[in-house]
Amino acid sequence: MKYLLDTGVLIHNLIAQSKLNRRALELLADNSSELYLSAASSWEITIKAGTGKLALPERPTQLQVRWPGGKSFSAAIPKKAREIQVDVEGTVKLVKSE
């Protein structure tokens, strides 16, 4: 089965599983589940981290994207990047840095 995860579910699964109900934990643990995130989730996480509402254990160093249709890529996130742009070919452009 395919599932689109809410950003809150993703965050709780990673750092506060006790806040998720039994059914959510079962779906997340089921290897046959196809889990998807909206591009908006990365935006929401970035905003929460930037405002201090979410403490990340470390800065992200890698970006992995899988486009509809199966095309995927992985790219390094530039050190001290505050904002990047990624095109459909996977080219990462630094927009703002610290």
Image (cartoon, rainbow, N blue to C red):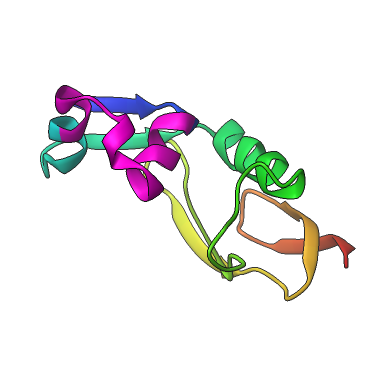
Q: Main secondary structure of the magenta part?
A: helix
Residue that appears at 78% across and 66% down: 81
On the image, the x and y values in percent for residue 36 come to: 37, 35
Q: Is residue 12 left or right of residue 33?
A: right
What stretch of residues is rendered in magenta? 8-25
Q: Tell whether position 55 is magenta.
A: no
Task: Tally the marks.
Answer: 0
Is residue 9 shown in magenta?
yes
- The quadrant in which residue 9 appears is top left
Q: Position of residue 3 (x, y in %)?
A: 29, 26
Q: Position of residue 28 (x, y in %)?
A: 21, 37
Q: Is residue 93 left or right of residue 57?
A: right
Residue 72 drawn above or below residue 47: below
Depth check, front residue: 65 or 79: 79
Q: Is 55 on the left or on the right of 11, as rendered?
A: right
Quarter occupied by residue 53: top right
Residue found at the far front of this picture: 18
Task: Say which residue appears at 61% left-offset and 56% top-offset.
Answer: 89
- Of the 4 image quadrants, the one containing the C terminus is bottom right
Q: Position of residue 20 (x, y in %)?
A: 28, 29
Q: Which residue is nearer to you in this view: 59 or 96? A: 59
Residue furthest bottom as drawn: 79
Quarter of the image for the N terminus: give it. Answer: top left
Q: Is residue 18 above or below residue 22?
A: below
What residue is at 67 percent from the left and 48 percent from the top? 49
